[in-house]
Image (cartoon, rainbow, N blue to C red):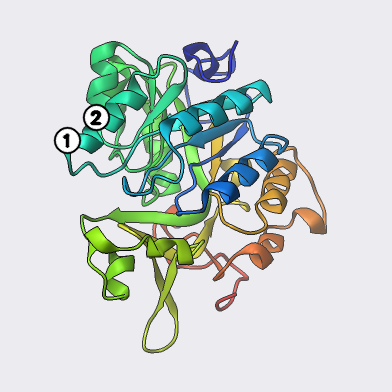
Amino acid sequence: MTGGTVSSATGADAHAGAEGECGVRRLALGPVLYHWPRDVMFRFYETMADAPVDVIYLGEVVCSKRRALTQTDWLALASELEVAGKQVVLSTLALIEAGSELGAVRSICENGRFMVEANDMSAVQMLAAAGTPFVTGPGVNIYNSCTLEVLARCGLKRWVMPVELSGSTLHDIHAGRPPGVETEVFAYGRLPLAYSARCYTARARNLPKDQCGFCCREDPDGLLLRTREDEAFLVLNGTQTQSARTFTLAGELADIGAQYFRLSPQSQHMSQIIEFFAARLAGGQGPACEPGRLYQYMPTGPCNGYWNGTAGLQQPAGACGDA
């Protein structure tokens, strides 16, 4: 069973019923959402090869202009990580604006070896037409079990729940989830909230999008925006808008009926964050496993409001102020 093949996404632990029947619970490392230099990216994944994550998503999701790594590079990384025992999934762009971008998505979908995370419906259409099993990313709007059923007939094997949905909504969706469809929940990271044709990072520097100079490289965790009251508000990441605070479900892991928990990469402390979640999933106890221990690794403090059905920037109980 290889890391990126169809069989790796539909293993014996795949549940076929209610929310509680989640089988083995695994950590997934989402795609890097920022524009890191080529050497930084390679060093990062060299470290991740030994990290206690089961699944690693690779690829450019945010902006097609970011070409520090070519598709050949991504495939080479995928092969190395597969040898290290990781299940590898190739991620596609979340916003398609040109024929060239559509061609790049098609090339990923037709890679013939690794599972693909479709981040928009054009990728879903390509994979479904080819009869290739796939994963949907958090940008694909799956809000009910009827949508899951339709996509399951198209080849969906795993879905990443949209970040704006609540835990109670997940429970309702699981009540009608099709057999064999696995669930992945975004469990840590700045929330990917929206994508736009406009590059707000370039606009903030009075640069046109087509002459941006790749200025997003200057902000390895995005460009933080604050309100006039000096409160952290949003983060600009090229064409993507993120939450300023870092979303965390560290305190809720035991009660979530999902097979996979996604950790979104950040430029610092990622190994410690992964080790923390691995310990939590293994049932670790004591001060080292308290959810509040994560706050020291967050650029601007925690949030988990969406999960609780309230304003997204609401902080977990006991948290206070920006980091």
Quarter of the figure that contains the N terminus? top right
Q: Is residue 193 above or below residue 47?
A: below
SS under mark 2: helix
Res. 296 image quadrant:
bottom right
Extreme-bottom residue of the structure: 229
Residue wearing tag 1? 99
Q: Is residue 257 above or below residue 133?
A: below
SS under mark 1: helix
Q: Is residue 35 left or right of residue 202?
A: right
Quarter of the figure that contains the C terminus? bottom right
The residue depicted at 20 percent of the width and 55 percent of the height is: 197
Residue wearing tag 2? 103
Cα distance between the residues tagged 1 and 2: 6 Å
Q: Is residue 86 left or right of residue 68?
A: right
Q: Is residue 241 above or below residue 7?
A: below
The residue depicted at 69 percent of the width and 42 percent of the height is: 47
Residue type indicated by callout 1: Gly
Tell me residue 301's x, y (percent). Answer: 56, 69
- Residues at discs 1 and 2 in contact (Cβ within 8 Å): yes
Front one among 30 and 280: 30
How many other residues sit within 10 Å of disc 1, few (<14), some (14-19) or many (≥20)? few
